Image: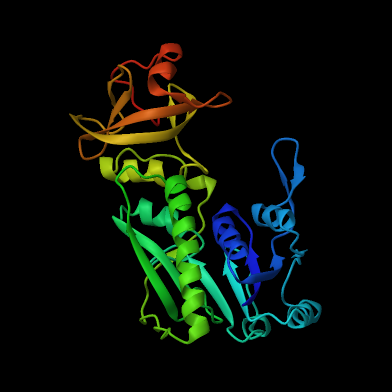
Amino acid sequence: MRIIFMGTPDFAVPSLKKLIESRHEVIAVFSQPDKPVGRKQILTPPPVKVVAQENNIPVYQPRSLKNEDVTNLINSLNADIIIVIAYGKILPKSVLEATKFGCVNVHASLLPKYRGAAPIQWSILNGDDKTGVTIMQMDEGLDTGDMLCVTETDIDINETSEMLFERLSVLGSDSLLTTLEKLEKGDIKPIPQPEGDYGYAQKITKTMSPIDFTKSAFEVHNHIRALQSWPCASTVILGKNVKIHSSVLCDETGRIAGEVVNNKDCLTVSCGDCKCIKILELQLEGKKRMDAKSFLMGFKIPIGTILGE
């Protein structure tokens, strides 16, 4: 197949690489415009653009797909299919219908659950034990198109969003190639998504960072691993803002939500259900990320300290 690939972040890279290595031909890549990154605000190309340029594939970065020039460009490429993975732009009907096989999307959830921008984080925030990748025929709705392939995987109790991103990006690339083979042969029967309100995985924001220790230990642990590596869960310890990078559930019991009950080698904190989490990695504002033992050597936190105050 002649493929137009639309994607922007790291999540889309394994699929692009798999397509480049396959018998298919990636004839063009569409990606978001370069953005300033870091303290020095250096203009930086998105990961998908970098891979495309390394493989001498033409890259287009229009600020909108909703204009006649872009539609004419896509039509002139004479592609068989458009693959869309975390592109970050709404596709108008003119683009959705521009190729023989339309637009196919790789979505990181078991649709119809977690339609929207942040399915991976919300699956962990909600404590799900399973997730997966859905290959979907795109329509004009938001992640509402017919399902072409669904691949399920377990979520480990200590798996972070960062870890799950990496796994699902690879799982999605494998599922995508299988789906393309079946599409080309006419061996796929699209399955309409069931009707109903299955929730929306809204964007993760910095305002979600503060930990609420009045919640159960399981919910607090999920909060920490879901917000890794951005924006990171956070709390206030003895008047200092601290990022919490990783934790585990433990058998110790506590009394007061947010109370430090153990400060040897790790930081054990009581939650709202009187169960505890062990905080394994922390980062003081303006400092480097550290394991709890090293952190506690330089920042004393007495037993009985209440986090978040």
Q: Position of residue 181 (x, y in %)?
A: 49, 76
Is residue 100 something one can see in this rendering?
yes
Q: Which of the pair 257/75 is nearer the observer?
A: 75
Residue at the front extreme? 23
Q: Which of the pair 4/131 is nearer the observer?
A: 4
Residue at (45, 81) in percent of width and height: 146
Is residue 111 something one can see in this rendering?
no
Q: Position of residue 289 (x, y in %)?
A: 50, 27
Figure check: 264 above or below 103: above
Figure check: 47 above or below 296: below
Figure check: 129 above or below 66: above
Q: Quadrant of the C terminus?
A: top left
Res. 5 image quadrant: bottom right
Horizontal arrangement in the rendering, residue 233 relative to residue 24 (left or right): left
Horizontal arrangement in the rendering, residue 252 relative to residue 286 (left or right): left
Q: Quadrant of the N terminus?
A: bottom right
Q: Position of residue 269 (x, y in %)?
A: 29, 29
Q: Which of the pair 29/268 is nearer the observer?
A: 29
Residue at (51, 46) in percent of width and height: 207
Residue at (29, 17) in percent of width and height: 303
Q: Position of residue 52 (x, y in %)?
A: 70, 58
Res. 133 image quadrant: bottom left
Numbered circles on residues, count: 0
Residue at the right extreme? 69
Horizontal arrangement in the rendering, residue 248 relative to residue 58 (left or right): left
Residue at (70, 66) in percent of width and height: 30
Q: Which of the pair 299/118 is nearer the observer?
A: 118
